Amino acid sequence: MTENRHAFFDSMIMFKRCGLISIRKVDALITAIIIPAMMMLLFVFVFGGAINVGDYDFVSFIVPGIILQCVGQCASFTSMSVNEDLTKGVFDRFRSMPIAKSAVLIGHVLASVVRNMLSTTVVIVIAMLIGFRPVASPLAWFAIVGMLLLYMLAITWISVLFGIIAQSPESAGGLAIFATILPYFSSGFVSVDTIAPVLQGFARNQPMTKVIDTVRALFLGMPVGDSWISATVWCVGIIVCFQVASVWLYSRKISK
């Protein structure tokens, strides 16, 4: 019990440290928000008239996909921060201190979730300014926040592992390429039925599609179906696997 309490307070201290780093690197945070916001404006005002999404309002249709792109951009910042701590010897200094090993990584994860929630809020506000009108009930909003938190934790633990494996902060930042491109191979911007047949199987069953379908249905007051089950299983599975792998690899790295 005492060890768990110490680990909790150690994690909060590391969280505060990562938060201060985020404030000092505000340009990276702003970039992570601006790029998805600009993509939303581009799709709505340039491509919106040419893309058929059936009975959906186009702005309402693409908001979940833009949110996932925003989370991917923020995850890149986390990956680079973890790698900088590793390559600059910061983790080695922490190793000599009486703190829980996992606290350092958990601090990065918590800071990433806070950044993601901030950037997601900004994206939703911008979407509402250009016509997004969610009809979600208070309970549906609670479910939306819960689903997005699960996805944020999943992509953040992936970014932590990328940061530990990468040889430099620049290569660690390459995570953003995958995290921002994969939403295009999903139901984020077009109906899966309009994607090339060779890719439809992947697009229909990949985790981003399940998360997007769930969030979109909740936003628009539509039946969610069983997409939330698949989305939850995917996210929880990723969180568990990548957390275990990250802590194990981090322990090996600092013990050398």
Image: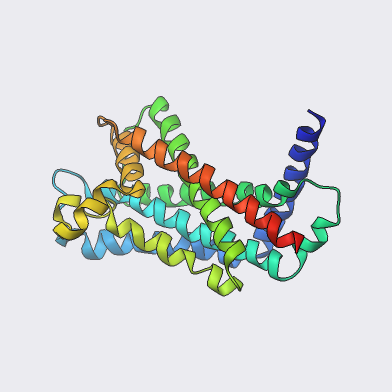
Pick the residue in front: 238 or 31: 238
The image quadrant of residue 25 is bottom right
Residue appearing at x 47%, y 46% in the figure: 238
Q: Does residue 114 appear in the picture of this structure?
A: no
Is 75 displayed left or right of 22 in the figure?
Answer: left
Q: Relative to 224, does residue 60 appear above or below in the rendering?
A: below
Q: Position of residue 234 (x, y in %)?
A: 40, 42
Q: Does residue 83 appear in the picture of this structure?
A: yes
Is 181 displayed left or right of 76 in the figure?
Answer: left
Residue appearing at x 59%, y 46% in the figure: 244
Q: Give the color scheme: rainbow, by chain, secondary structure or one colour.
A: rainbow
**Count of marks overlaid on the render:** 0
Q: Position of residue 182 (x, y in %)?
A: 35, 59
Q: Relative to 173, does residue 212 appear above or below in the rendering?
A: above
Q: Position of residue 107 (x, y in %)?
A: 68, 49
Residue appearing at x 21%, y 46% in the figure: 57
Q: Position of residue 228 (x, y in %)?
A: 35, 34
For the C terminus, give its image quadrant.
bottom right
Residue appearing at x 55%, y 68% in the figure: 172
For the N terminus, give its image quadrant.
top right
Is 197 displayed left or right of 77 in the figure?
Answer: left
Q: Relative to 37, does residue 204 appear above or below in the rendering?
A: above
